[in-house]
Each structure stands twice: as structure tokens, then as C-alpha cells.
Image (tube, helix red, strand yellow):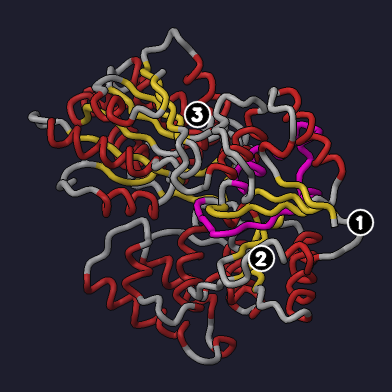
């Protein structure tokens, strides 16, 4: 393992797995590696850069300075659907299966055979009832293993796959990618950070990433990027120590000034805020999005405003909690409605399909009704159905209900109106991928002493660039920090946190 050696990663021509910690420049190393490989590729073979979101794929595309024409840059789902399932389903399963199937999320089943029957009889590709199982990827693996033509196509087309955020892959995704690597002899370049996996509830299996990285018998060259370009040294030391519970990444500092724990006997929030610079960006992060936590966030916003502070709560919305395939499309549509600067072209650029200029004009002719001053007077259901019909995507009743709850309720305006607030309150899940100058956390949001919430804690602490303040309103949290410090031979909590008792 070559810790932090970026030049070695860029020069490595084999199978590569990179553990890239928060703020370590993961996307930068990924795009640089793609660019170098494309420049050195003198043959007809292509690459596939696979991500979890269209936004991430777009970011990779925008960062590349070399032409990607003919190569695949897109999501995991679009890769297996368009490169494996549609082209080769008939070759693998027979002519009773059409490649013109419709992808739907309201048709759920228990077994693989029932999923196949749904495609054969109704021409619909559905999903498992168990959200930890992935029918689309299981189907893709079945097709690829049965169809020699599919195998030859993938082998003839691609020389390497680049897979981003691998810690969020589920078991079925992992099996497919390992088959492509070991059976088809196509190299993989994998990047991710198991510490930032907070989606196990929907099937993510970060332990697979750990197993691959720690397995000395596989054919992957292993690297670890630990230098955090986002956070100051104090915050790096704190987040790494609490996540790893050992001091191997600790960087010596003379005095800790930027990780501060405030211990109070009473509710003295204003005194806690005194240890933050109110002239700079401050984000207060709340542990989760459950209804009780939402109320706490609202009450905190009102309390701070009553004291003259301009904190704005950025809530999770009904769309954020939606567990269907159209979630991202509906979120982009909500932005189009609530953000005056968000245009039809912004919307289209964030959709999972390509549209002609005429198709864009056609869509704009009816969805511009969403921009009207009184949205209550328009037929939202009709416009939504028409919009999704143009995209040739099915929308279901649950999605329409959640969409209407979001856009018709003023309390969700701040989530999608595009306004940047200097002082805000938001959930940890909503903050993933973001960064802030200063972050305030609450100790009682985490149960580290019970070996819980470690990933959430790591994500939360590494959102802060310059200062991290922790409101020590839970003795178990501080006791756990003390225990970790002692067990890691740092001897005193002052090596990672300045504790202040008010």
C-alpha cells in the first residue's frame, strides 16, 4: 500500500483500489487517471466512468480536458441497462423477452423468477421488495454469464471501468463488477471511502470495500489518500481518531484551537455560539431527519432568531425521503419551480436522458406553468404525467403525492430555492458532499459509546474546514472521546480537543 502517493496511482496500469478520505481530492485523482489513460490509449477500446448520480457523471465530464466521445460516462443503472440488459436479454433468455421493456418501481416482487416473469409477460423491469437486493444488477449478471455475445461485446469495447463511490455499492453490484474484472479480464479503477457510507439501509455494503482493500490475495494494487485538503489539521486529527480509534493518522499540533468542546450544565446556546465567528459561514448539523429532529431544528431556528441570529433551517423534504427511481428527476423539477434562476436548460441538463431542441421546447410549453405566481390554480397531476410521458418514464401515485407535498408547502422553499445562506441548520444526510467554514454539532446526536453512528459522525465532522464546535450535552460522548484518547496513547484529550466548561 502506498499511502497518499498520487503519482504512483496515476502511473499504475493495473487494477487499482483507492481509499480516498474526506477532502482528499477523490474526484481530482479519478479524472486525472481517466485523462492519462485516454491519452495513452492507442487502440479502439473505450472506458466507462460509472457513478451513482448524473450530477457526479456530469462533474467528471466537465473536469476532463480530453474528448470523451464514444466513451461511457453515466450512472450504474444506465450502464447495466444500456450496455448489458437491453442489447443482450434476448440472446441470453430467449425471444420471449423484449428489449423494449419499461423500467418501473411500483412493480415489486420477492424472487428473481417473478422478476423475469414480469419482464416476459408485462414487458416491465421492476424491483425487489427487499431494498437491499438489486434485481437490475442480478439480471445483468445473469445475462452476461449466459450470453457469449454480451461477453465479447464488453471485452471488445472496454479496456477499463472507473467506479466512483464504491462504498455505496450493494452485493449485486459488487458481484457484477467482480465478474467483469475476473471473468472478462477488464481492469477496474475503484475509488471510495467506507467511512462515508451512510446508505446501508438501502443496500450499500461498505464492508465489501474493506474486504477488497484488506485482501492481499486479490489482484488489486491498493492506495490510501489521507491528506485532507478541506479540513485544518485539528479537524483531521479529531475526525480520523474518532473514526479509526487509533492515532496512526495523527499529525502533531502544538495547540488545538479549532476543535472545541463546550460543556454546560444548562441550555446556554448563545454562549456556545461565542466560540464561532458569526461573520463567517456557520452550519449547525442535526443527526437525522425524523419528525422529532425536524421539530428540534425548527425550534432551534426560532430560538436563534429570537436572540437576533439569522439562522435558516434547510429541511429535508418529502422528496428527499422518497425511495424510488424518479426521486432525482422530481428534485430537479422542484428546483425549477422554487428557484427563479433555475431554467428549463438547467433542468434538462440534469435529466438522465438526452433531448433534442424541439423536444425541449415542447416540454417547456407546458411545464412553464409551474412558474406561475399561484401554483395552487394549476393542474399539477396533469402536468407531471405529461412531463414524464414525454420522458417515456412511468410516474406513480406515491411520487406525485410527495412532489405536491414539497412544492405546495412554503416550509420547503429553502431546500430548493438556490439561495446561499451564511448561517444555516440542516441534517447530516443533507450535508453529505458539502463543506462549510464552521460546523456546530450536538454530542447527544451520536451514540459512539455504543459503537453506533460512527460513519455519520465522520461525515459530520469532516464537513468543517476551519472550525468544529461540539456542544457537549451528553456525558457519554465526552467519556468515549477520553477513552479513545487514552487507548491511542495520546494521553490527554487536549491533544485533539479544547474542552471548555461554562
- Check disc 3: other Cα within 10 Å, few if <14, some if 14-19, many if 20+: many
**Magenta highlight on residue 435:** yes
Instruction: Give the residue number, with chain letter if any, for mark 3.
Output: 172
> What element does badge 2 sit on?
strand
Give how far across and how far down residue 312 sits, in percent.
65, 73
Is 195 left, or right, of 449 in this rendering? left
Is 399 left, or right, of 328 in this rendering? right
Q: Name the image quarter holding residue 281.
A: bottom right
Query: Does label 1 or label 2 sit earlier along the sequence?
Result: 1
Write down the region rendered in magenta: 433-461
- Real-space Cα distance between discs 2 and 3? 36 Å
Give how far across and how far down residue 265 sits, in percent.
91, 56
> Camera-side residue: 140 or 405?
405
Against 183, residue 338 (above or below) is below
Asked if marks 3 and 1 touch (Cβ < 8 Å), the reply is no
What numbered label is drawn on residue 425? Answer: 2
> Camera-side residue: 254 or 479?
254
Which callout, 1 or 2, points to the residue nearer the camera?
Answer: 1
What numbered label is drawn on residue 265? Answer: 1
Which callout, 2 or 3, points to the residue nearer the camera?
Answer: 2
Give how far across and how far down residue 434 sits, in percent.
51, 55
Query: Does label 2 or label 3 sit earlier along the sequence?
Result: 3
Amino acid at each position: 500500500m502506498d499511502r497518499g502517493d498520487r503519482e504512483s496511482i496515476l502511473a499504475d496500469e493495473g487494477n487499482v483500489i483507492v481509499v480516498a478520505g474526506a477532502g482528499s481530492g477523490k474526484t481530482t485523482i479519478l479524472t486525472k487517471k481517466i485523462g492519462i489513460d485516454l491519452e495513452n490509449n492507442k487502440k479502439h477500446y473505450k472506458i466507462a466512468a460509472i457513478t451513482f448520480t448524473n450530477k457526479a457523471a456530469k462533474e467528471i465530464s466537465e473536469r476532463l480536458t480530453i474528448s470523451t466521445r464514444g466513451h461511457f460516462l453515466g450512472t450504474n443503472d444506465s450502464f447495466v441497462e444500456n450496455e448489458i440488459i437491453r442489447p443482450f436479454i434476448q440472446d441470453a433468455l430467449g425471444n420471449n423477452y423484449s428489449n423494449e421493456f419499461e423500467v418501473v418501481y411500483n412493480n415489486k416482487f420477492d424472487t428473481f423468477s417473478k422478476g423475469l416473469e414480469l419482464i416476459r409477460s408485462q414487458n416491465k423491469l421492476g424491483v425487489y421488495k427487499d431494498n437491499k437486493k438489486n434485481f437490475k444488477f442480478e439480471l445483468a449478471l445473469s445475462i452476461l454469464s449466459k450470453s457469449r455475445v454480451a461477453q465479447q461485446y464488453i471485452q471488445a469495447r472496454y479496456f477499463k471501468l472507473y467506479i466512483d463511490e464504491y462504498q455505496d455499492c450493494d452485493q449485486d453490484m459488487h458481484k457484477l463488477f467482480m465478474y467483469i474484472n475476473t471473468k472478462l479480464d477488464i481492469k477496474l479503477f475503484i475509488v471510495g471511502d467506507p467511512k462515508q457510507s451512510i446508505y446501508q439501509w438501502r443496500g450499500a455494503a461498505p464492508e465489501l470495500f474493506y474486504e477488497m482493500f484488506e485482501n492481499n490475495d486479490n489482484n488489486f494494487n491498493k492506495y490510501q489518500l489521507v491528506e485532507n485538503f478541506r479540513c485544518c489539521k485539528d479537524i483531521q486529527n479529531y475526525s480520523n481518531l474518532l473514526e479509526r480509534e487509533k492515532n496512526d493518522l495523527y499529525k502533531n499540533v502544538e495547540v488545538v484551537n479549532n476543535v472545541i468542546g463546550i460543556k454546560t450544565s444548562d441550555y446556554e446556546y448563545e454562549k456556545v455560539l461565542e466560540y464561532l465567528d458569526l461573520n463567517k459561514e456557520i452550519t449547525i448539523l442535526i443527526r437525522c431527519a425524523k419528525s422529532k429532529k425536524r421539530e428540534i431544528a425548527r425550534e432551534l431556528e426560532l430560538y436563534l432568531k429570537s436572540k437576533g441570529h439569522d439562522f435558516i433551517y434547510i429541511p429535508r423534504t418529502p422528496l428527499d425521503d422518497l425511495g424510488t427511481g424518479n426521486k432525482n428527476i422530481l428534485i430537479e423539477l422542484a428546483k425549477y419551480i422554487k428557484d427563479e434562476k433555475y431554467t428549463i436548460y438547467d433542468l434538462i441538463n440534469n435529466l438522465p436522458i438526452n433531448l433534442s431542441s424541439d423536444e425541449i421546447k415542447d416540454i417547456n410549453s407546458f411545464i412553464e406553468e409551474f412558474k406561475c405566481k399561484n401554483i395552487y390554480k394549476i393542474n399539477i397531476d396533469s402536468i407531471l404525467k405529461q412531463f414524464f410521458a414525454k420522458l417515456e418514464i412511468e410516474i406513480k401515485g406515491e411520487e406525485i403525492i410527495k412532489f405536491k407535498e414539497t412544492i405546495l408547502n412554503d416550509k420547503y422553499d429553502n431546500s430548493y430555492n438556490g439561495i446561499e445562506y451564511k448561517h444555516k441548520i440542516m441534517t447530516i444526510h443533507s450535508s453529505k458532499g458539502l463543506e462549510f467554514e464552521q460546523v456546530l454539532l450536538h454530542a447527544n446526536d451520536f451514540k459512539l459509546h455504543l459503537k453506533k453512528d460512527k460513519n455519520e459522525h465522520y461525515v459530520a465532522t469532516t464537513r468543517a474546514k476551519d472550525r468544529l464546535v461540539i456542544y457537549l450535552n451528553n456525558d457519554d460522548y465526552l467519556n468515549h472521546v477520553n477513552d479513545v484518547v487514552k487507548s491511542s496513547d495520546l494521553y490527554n484529550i487536549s491533544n485533539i480537543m479544547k474542552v471548555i466548561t461554562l
